[in-house]
Image: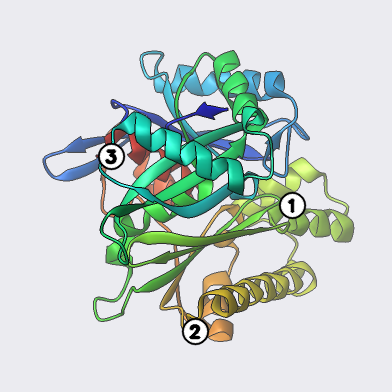
Amino acid sequence: MKFERLWKRSQPPLIGLDIGSHAAKAVLLSQTTEGWMVEHATQVLIPAEAVSEHEIKDFEAVGNALKPLLTRLGKKNHLVAAAVAGSSVITKIIYVDGGGSEADLEAQVQIEADHLIPFPLEEVSLDFEVKGENSADASRIDILLSACRTEHVESRVAALETAGYTPKVMDIEAFALGRTLPLMNSQFPEDMPQNTVAMVDIGANMMLFTIVSNGETIYNREQPFGGEQFNQAVVGYYGMEPAAVETAKLEGALPANYDFEVLAPFQTQMVQQIRRNIQIFSTSSGINEIDMLVLSGGSAILPGTVELLREELSVHAVLANPFVGMEISPNLDQSKLNETAHQYVIACGLAMRGHSE
């Protein structure tokens, strides 16, 4: 059993590195007197089947694929914040006695974890964050406990070290996603409440559904749904090579009738998945209204998707752009960055860990 200290303060700069099954996205941020600056934002392809359902199956293949990022970002920038998927993490709010030392706190957390975690503690990496005084008992404090099978952490660490990086923070994808919400305030109407916001990231094979309420990430759920299903449908209908589909999608060069034969069914399924997740959240939380929806990930840019979500779900939906209020390094192509910003939301949230309190 290890205390990984996922929330421990780290010295900047940290590369935020989002490792997906199709691509790895990297973001490096700095802070100026005016706010945030994007120093770098870049990505590389991940070999097929090296990552499956958020699990790294071949850490050497992933590590070798990540090496070009180190060259692009500069070898002096080698400290990394990465993340494990929420499906591999157990999170619980626990209550412990306050007023003791950190060692006392860790001992209490370990005792509570032993009761709550359905795995032997020697196989688990633990972390905890003090949330504050318990509302019902001032002598106790609320603790957010996170537990992840150590093998999930170690596979990411092995891939990063193979690539030449120094892992400093191992976060949780849902928390990284939720952390970026304040960056996008200018995308929302000023008079619209933001009490409960659904953030939906659609990756190649998995959809991450996260709820942020009053600035706190309070709920997350994953579904096996993503852009690869769209790509496979295009391959099946038109006989295109899989590699050519992704290029054609980005360049708007898919067959003329794809919108009816492939796009509309895929978007219908996306709406159904998101609606179902909202219903499950509402049933479990008693919160019946979502104020806004923020869509990110590779498939978020498919034509008409945001507009369809607004219409079908009766919610104000926007395409995520975490860089919208940031200064952009002169070394970056600003127009290209704006076109791909929706792909970098989790990586951006991870990069912010290098500047957290």
Real-space Cα separation, disc 3 to disc 1, in angstroms: 34 Å
Horizontal side, residue 101 vs residue 289: left or right? left
Q: How is the image coloured?
A: rainbow
Q: Please tell me which of labels 3 and 1 falls first in the chain.
A: 1
* Callout 2 crowding tier (Cα within 10 Å): few <14, some 14–19, many ≥20: few
User: What residue is drawn where x is 74% and y is 25%?
Assistant: 58
Q: Amino acid at mark 1?
A: Glu
Q: Position of residue 112 (x, y in %)?
A: 52, 45
Badge 3 element: loop
Callout 1: SS: helix
Dot label at residue 288: 2
* Front-most of residues 68 and 188: 188
- Residue at numbered disc 1: 228
Q: For this rendering, which residue is in front, 177 or 95? A: 95
Where does the C terminus fall, quadrant-wise? Answer: top left
Q: Is residue 239 visible?
A: yes
User: In the rendered view, does 201 fall on the left or right side of 51?
Assistant: left
Is residue 27 among the parts visible in the rendering? no
Left or right, residue 30 beside residue 17: left
User: Is 144 or 338 nearer to us in this picture?
Assistant: 144
